[in-house]
Image (cartoon, rainbow, N blue to C red):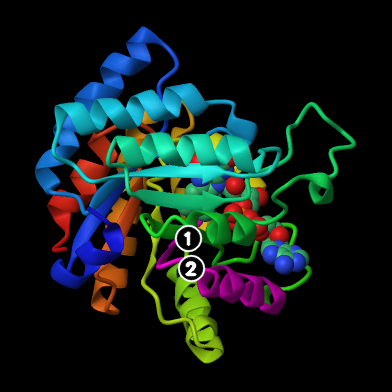
Amino acid sequence: MRVADLFKIRERGVSFEFFPPKTVLGENGFKQTVNDLKHYNPLYVSVTYGAGGSTQERTVNTLKWIKEKTDLTVMSHLTCIGSTRDGIDNILKDYMANNIDNILALRGDPPKNVTDFDLTKGEFVYAKDLVEFVACYNYFSIAVAVYPEGHFESPSIEKDMEFTKMKIAAGAEFGITQMFFDNRYYYDFMDRAQKIGITVPILPGIMPITDCGKIEEFASFCNATIPQEIKKKMEPFLTRPEEMEKIGIEYAIRQCEDLIRNGVKYLHFYTMNKSGPSSSIIDSISI
Ligand code: FAD
């Protein structure tokens, strides 16, 4: 079912993001995670897509497995830089044939091993171009990525918001935020979005911090600030992962409770293919 239609009939809910597993071990863990999380009756579950199509086959197979083995609504992430219109057309037709009708339309990042990659030379330059392309099929519900702290390449937070508005005007029906750990970034983003006339649902992306070192590296790449409070709390436990996880989950519970108190109705969880942290959080909040 199209996620945009689900918003009309589901007042509240959660969604889960997975990545396509690489190994047999990873696959078994992923399948267990999907089975563990499905009883939360998620609005949808999404599967990431490697930039430049690097995980195309695994992403498609993962989506097909979920569709075959569960009755969950699925959404495919899809990146466009380095792709051709024909290539994207093939993927979209395959999705239509398999009743996969939700797409998170993304630009993606240039390949790390190519230093002189010219973003402007491809058939798609920005996510907006992909949104326009996907919208032409009149079949998919389209989501886009949004950035409470601004995208790292953006000249300013205001420009970033203008570009976000353009993606939505091109046909996106909802947004999902980059992870953030201080809700003020989300509330400020929503204020700016409202002022510029963005009215579609914007789902906050929740990433439970389970390993301070790893998340810090990832968060700096994503332009997401880790609050000093959580760093200080985790510092004494850097060699004790279960303690760090406990602290991260407690923090995310308070973060989600605050979002819900402030009117948020849908939460998107970055699961990292693990069910434990998301389950502990959802069991402790009322969404
Ligand atoms: P865009 O919206 O195209 O923006 C890219 C940059 O260009 C921004 O700085 C923007 O401000 C600027 N810009 C946009 N339009 C214009 C314009 N008209 N003129 C000038 N500048 C402009 N990556 C993956 O590879 N696979 C995934 O599965 C994946 N999933 C993600 C899920 C979520 C929820 C999020 C938040 C991100 C995800 N990403 C994923 C990361 C994403 O691909 C990167 O953040 C990428 O750098 C930008 O993608 P975008 O779709 O936001 O790009």
Is 171 positioned to the left or the right of 130 in the image? left
Over which residues does the magenta segment extend?
Answer: 158-179
Q: What element carries label 2?
A: loop
Q: Are marks 2 and 1 in contact (CB under 8 Å)?
A: yes
Graded by Cα atoms within 10 Å as few (under 14), some (14 to 19) or many (20 or more), the crowding at tag 1 reads some
Looking at the image, which is closer to me, 234 or 264? 264
Instruction: From this view, report whether residue 15 is shown above or below residue 190.
Output: above
Looking at the image, which is closer to me, 163 or 244? 163
Question: On the image, numbered disc 2 is attached to which residue?
Answer: 171
| Residue at figure coordinates x 66%, y 71% from the top left | 160
> Which quarter of the frame holds ligand 1?
bottom right
Looking at the image, which is closer to me, 265 or 214? 265
How far is disc 2 from disc 1 in space, using C-alphas? 6 Å
Q: Is residue 267 visible?
A: yes
Looking at numbered disc 1 in the image, what kind of residue is underneath it?
Ala
Instruction: From this view, report whether residue 283 is shown above or below residue 170.
Output: above
Residue 132, image x and y in percent? 56, 61
Looking at the image, which is closer to me, 186 or 193? 193
Question: On the image, numbered disc 1 is attached to which residue?
Answer: 135
Residue 181, image x and y in percent? 46, 59
Query: Which quadrant of the structure image shows residue 170?
Result: bottom right
Which disc is residue 16 wearing? none
Looking at numbered disc 2 in the image, what kind of residue is underneath it?
Gly
Residue 147, image x and y in percent? 56, 63
Is 185 inside the magenta-drawn segment? no
